[in-house]
Amino acid sequence: MSKRFYFIALSFISAFGLIVVSSVSLSIRGYLAVLLSLVSSLLLLAVFRLKIGKFSSKNILSLFGPTLLLPLGFGLIFVHFPNFSVFFRLLVYIFYLISYYFSILIGNILFVVSEEGEKIPLLRAAQAASYVISTGTLFLLLTALYKTDTYFIFQSLGVFVAGFILSFQVLSLTKYLGSKMFEKISEGSFLFSILLFESSLSFSFIPLKSFSRALVISGFFYLFIGIYQNFLAKSLNRKVLFEYLGVILLIFFAVFFLE
């Protein structure tokens, strides 16, 4: 059977797991969301090992970073927002299925480029898709994180970890340059994580709703990654800067009206 069959099957299995998470008692949904993330990740790694080929352990984050956290982000939606209508739940399931499938495809494209050394035209499309999925996943995770009663310092540490994992793939896809690029990607991811950590600490002293705070920090992630990947691709100019700053201004206006 083809790789596509396994990718589609894995996506439906993970989506079914999300349906189970949203259907059980609220008291155990959080645990099942974590379990869904772990099981989906193990199945994903097994499929790649058996059907695609061996890959370097250092490339796990770049290949599967967003895919590993995507089930957790969606699962926690039903923990903190349990009263969704049937129609909205159906939309979430469909959106998750599509997002998860595309995440697997992105990992496969990066595998072909990084492990096999092939150049394929889908790399730019994969970069854009990874950028969007990573930003969306971070927003879901932070919304759930800020809904908890955890101390702000631990919330900010969670932002640091999520930002590091999610930025890895986007930077890897920006302009793949082989193993020499690994240290630069690590440094970039660490830098973004520090910036997000400090941003989270700063906004913890401002009375914002969890949704608004997650929107702001995710907007910073979008800004930092966007500017840095354009810098790596040597396409950073004034027009690009104004475009990203415009998006940030729109987010702040949205937060103002939401509050």
Image: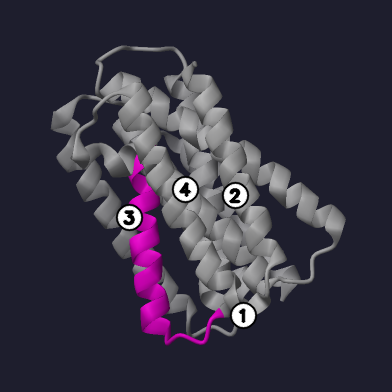
Residue 168 shown left or right of residue 237 in the figure: left
User: Residue 164 shows which numbered tag?
Assistant: 3
Mark seen at residue 40: 4
**Quadrant housing the C terminus:** bottom right
Above or below, comparing residue 86 to residue 82 in the picture? above
Q: Amino acid at mark 1?
A: Ser
Q: Which residues are magenta?
A: 148-170
- The residue nearer to you, when weighing 79 against 256, is 79
Q: In the image, which is nearer the foreground, mark 2 or mark 1?
A: 1
Q: Which residue is mark 2?
A: 247
Mark 3 Cα shell of 10 Å, populated few (<14), some (14-19), many (≥20):
many
Q: Position of residue 190 (x, y in %)?
A: 25, 55
The span from disc 4 to disc 3 (Cα, nearest Å) is 20 Å
Question: Relative to 108, does residue 169 appear above or below in the rendering?
Answer: below
Residue annotated with mark 1: 27
Q: Which residue lies at the image location 62% right of the left edge and 54% below the top edge?
A: 18
Residue type at mark 2: give it: Val
Q: Nearer the viewer, mark 3 or mark 2?
A: 3
The residue under the point 25% across, 37% down is 59
Real-space CA distance between mark 3 and mark 2, rounded to the nearest whole angstrom: 22 Å
Kindly identify the residue that appears in the image at 20 percent across and 41 percent down.
58
Q: Earlier in the sequence, mark 2 or mark 4?
A: 4
Secondary element at tag 2: helix
Is 158 included in the stretch rendered in magenta? yes
